[in-house]
Amino acid sequence: AAPATPPPAAATATAADLRPISTPAPSYPVAALRNGTSGEVQVEFTVGTDGSVTNARVVRSNPSRVFDREAVSAVRSWRFQPIPNPVTTRRTIGFNPGG
C-alpha cells in the first residue's frame, strides 16, 4: 500500500511573508530634534489581507512618549503586498537626530 500523503497545507502568511511596498519614515518631533534626543519605539501592528496596517500601538518606547505619536502615525501609513490572512507583527523604529 502506498503511504498516505498529507493534504496540502493552507496558505497561511506569517510575519516573514510580509513584503513592504511603502514604509515612509516617521517625522522627527521638533523638540526632540532641537534637544538632540534619540530613541526607539517598538510598534505592534496588524497587516490586513489588502496590505494595509491596522491596530498599530506602542509596545515599548525609550524615552517614554517622546516619539510614540510619530512612530504610530508612520506605521499606519505603511503598505505591504496583499497576503492571504491578517498578520500581527512588531517592528522597532529608531530615531537618531544625526541620521
Image: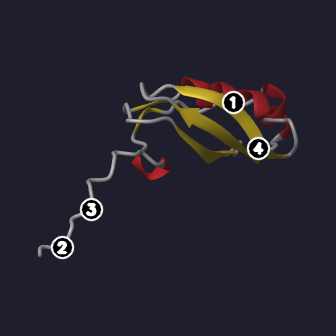
Q: CA distance from mark 1 to mark 3?
A: 42 Å
The residue that disc 4 covers is: 59
Q: CA distance from mark 3 to mark 2?
A: 9 Å
**Residue ID at (50%, 35%):** 86
Give the residue at the far left of this rendering.
1
As shown in the figure, which amino acid type bears the numbered disc 1?
Val
Q: Earlier in the sequence, mark 1 or mark 3?
A: 3
As shown in the figure, which amino acid type bears the numbered disc 4?
Val
The residue that disc 3 covers is: 6
Q: Quadrant of residue 28?
A: top right
Query: Tag 4's secondary structure?
Result: strand
The nearer-to-camera label among 4 and 1 is: 4
Q: CA distance from mark 1 to mark 2?
A: 51 Å
Disc 1 residue crowd, few under 14, some 14–19, many 20+, Cα 10 Å: many
**Residue ID at (86%, 38%):** 35
Q: Quadrant of residue 3?
A: bottom left
Disc 2 residue crowd, few under 14, some 14–19, many 20+, Cα 10 Å: few
Q: Position of residue 38 (x, y in %)?
A: 77, 46
**Residue ID at (38%, 35%):** 83
Q: Which mark is residue 3?
A: 2
Q: Which mark is residue 72?
A: 1
